[in-house]
């Protein structure tokens, strides 16, 4: 079978044929994945590293809680810190977010989402705390007691 140096594409009437032509062109480009959409892809090794780190970062808080190694005042911050580390592992190994120039818009969208979630969570805690304080039965004027 002869493969031309420069593939020529014709306007396909069937979208499946057009898709097949697209993948044929990508295959001729000799890229590693059979397609190139500008996104970085991880190797099996990086996925396994990410998976192993995720399992370890899940098992540590579970073990600390079940074995009662730390007092509860120290356990909650440790679990939160390990949770943040696990988020970073997922962002790096599974979502392939890094500081490269190709990830600028993904990082901007992530930061925007994090800010909105922060406002939502902090605002909810603030409102619920004030509602609890203001609606506490013992604090009401002219209460039942």
Image: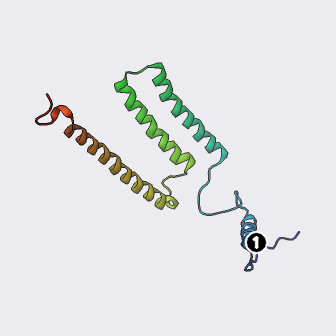
Near-viewer residue (62 or 85):
62
Q: Where is residue 63 in the image (x, y as percent from the top left)?
A: 50, 24
Q: How many marks?
A: 1
Disc 1 residue crowd, few under 14, some 14–19, many 20+, Cα 10 Å = few
Secondary structure under tag 1 reads helix
Near-viewer residue (109 or 17):
17
Quarter where residue 15 is shown: bottom right
Does residue 6 lie above or below 91 as drawn?
A: below
Near-viewer residue (17 or 144):
144
Q: Where is residue 137 in the image (x, y as percent from the top left)?
A: 20, 33
Q: Position of residue 17 (x, y in %)?
A: 76, 72
Does residue 107 lie above or below 17 as drawn?
A: above
Question: Viewed as shown, does residue 3 lie left or right of 81?
Answer: right
- Look at the image and tell me in which quarter the C terminus lies: top left
> Looking at the image, which residue is at 65% across and 63% down?
36
Question: Viewed as shown, does residue 89 lie left or right of 135?
Answer: right
> Looking at the image, which residue is at 44% across and 54% down?
110
Most extreme residue toward the bottom is: 11
| Residue under numbered circle 1 | 17
């Amino acid at each position: 079978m002869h493969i031309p140096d420069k593939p020529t594409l014709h306007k396909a009437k069937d979208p499946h044929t057009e898709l097949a032509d697209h993948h044929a062109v990508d295959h001729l480009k000799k890229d590693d994945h059979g397609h190139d959409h500008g996104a970085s892809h991880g190797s099996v090794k990086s996925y396994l590293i990410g998976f192993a780190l995720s399992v370890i970062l899940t098992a540590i808080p579970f073990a600390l809680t079940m074995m009662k190694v730390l007092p509860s005042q120290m356990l909650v911050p440790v679990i939160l810190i390990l949770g943040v580390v696990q988020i970073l592992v997922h962002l790096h190994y599974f979502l392939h977010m890094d500081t490269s120039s190709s990830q600028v818009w993904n990082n901007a969208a992530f930061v925007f989402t994090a800010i909105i979630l922060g406002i939502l969570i902090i605002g909810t805690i603030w409102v619920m705390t004030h509602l609890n304080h203001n609606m506490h039965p013992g604090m009401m004027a002219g209460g039942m007691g």
